[in-house]
Image (cartoon, rainbow, N blue to C red):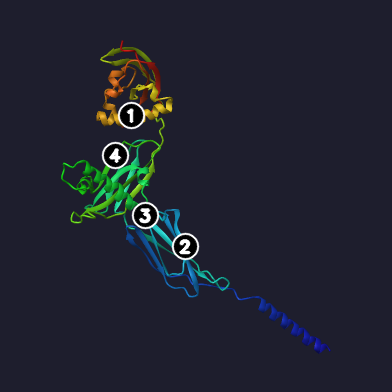
Amino acid sequence: MKKFLSMMAVALVAAVSFSACSDDDDPLQALSQPVILQSEQMNDNPITLTFAWDVVENAVSYEYSLDAVAGDSVANIAKGSTKNLSVTIVANDKVVLDYDTEYRFTVKAIGQEGVFLNSAETTCTAKTSAAPLKLSMEVLSYRSGSFSVKPSNADMRYQTALIEYEKYGKYATDKEFIEGYEFGYYKQIAASRPWIPAPWTYWLDDNGQQGDYTFNSRSMQPGKKYIFYAWGYQIDDNDSENPVKVLTPLMKKVFTTPGWAATSKTTFKLAVGEQTVENGVVDVKVSVVPSNEKEHYLAVFIPAEKVTDHASVVNYLINLLPNMEKVGNIDEWHKQDAVKTGAQTISSNEVAIVSSNNVTPGKDYVVAVFGIDNTGCVITNVATEKFTSISAE
């Protein structure tokens, strides 16, 4: 009996041991890491990156990701899943690929759920080529900036300009913008000058650039969106249907100018004095005392119906100064006789740089005095004084 019980105990232990082994399944095996075989830029117009890897046994698909890397900054550009052994990523309106940029590509093999574990990630890098046209810019103020283009090929001809972003945004693609807006602009010039026997491509190339080029603009508005762009081209006069060959993508920088704000604390005390009339023009004397005698300032006489408050006065002046520059051919404001420093008694006729600034008889006016820098920026809060000009009688 004891022998029987002993044999039963051994059998029970064996059964328990067998049961425990059966319930403990073998751990799932992870797939091998993909081996990347290709990592390169295939095209630069548009930028095209291709990555390929060797097959991973038992993989059902592959997941990938592309990131732009700049120092410690990492930004995801694209990600997805594929059953293929390669992926090509092309720059478009949704996928932003840039020149002279390092990209990090990551891929891993995906196994059948419950059968294989996913592989570890494999990573490689690819750096895009230098830009065919490198753009750089410096926004100097709410209305001015400096813009430069440096081509990788010094012999290539190119167009460059700065325009309001709204004009660019009306076109669905960069190709439509170049062929519609850019080509259209020069076709209009050719049509408006029929006495000059030259095709529209002549005007385009006449405005083209070659080599390093920098231009300055003082025509911008505060708080407005702009686009600075350039594109390379070649003219083939033997091709009447397609005479302009676009050689590069539309290289562009989109930016918004800062809003206006006073950058100087100078204030002005004003007093409207004597008025006289001659030849239908009123000459108004205004006493101006600035808090800073070294500040350059300008007085402008504005019809009262054109402004309602301080903000509208500032906006009026911001729009007026570029027009005064064009009409008066003004480059450096501090060299203008109308721009003053220190305490002065100012004559409205003296500061009327253009005739439209003259004061006419019998009207309500606002005299506005403000600090002005050499590039024609309003740099102080504007001091104002209302008055009615005397009649001509």
Query: What amino acid is at disc 1?
Result: Leu
Q: Is residue 4 above or below residue 311?
A: below
- Circle on res. 276: none
Q: CA distance from mark 3 to mark 4?
A: 25 Å
Tell which tag, 3 or 1, sits nearer the viewer. Answer: 1
Q: Which of disc 4 and disc 2 is earlier in sequence?
A: 2
Q: CA distance from mark 2 to mark 3?
A: 20 Å
Look at mark 4 in the image and give the residue it sits on: 216
Tell which tag, 2 or 1, sits nearer the viewer. Answer: 1
Query: What amino acid is at disc 4?
Result: Asn
Q: Which of disc 1 and disc 3 is earlier in sequence?
A: 3
Look at mark 1 in the image and give the residue it sits on: 320
Look at mark 2 in the image and give the residue it sits on: 80
Look at mark 3 in the image and give the residue it sits on: 98
What is the x, y in percent for residue 23?
67, 76
Q: CA distance from mark 3 to mark 1?
A: 39 Å
Q: Where is the N terminus found, in terms of image quarters?
A: bottom right
Name the secondary structure under disc 1: helix
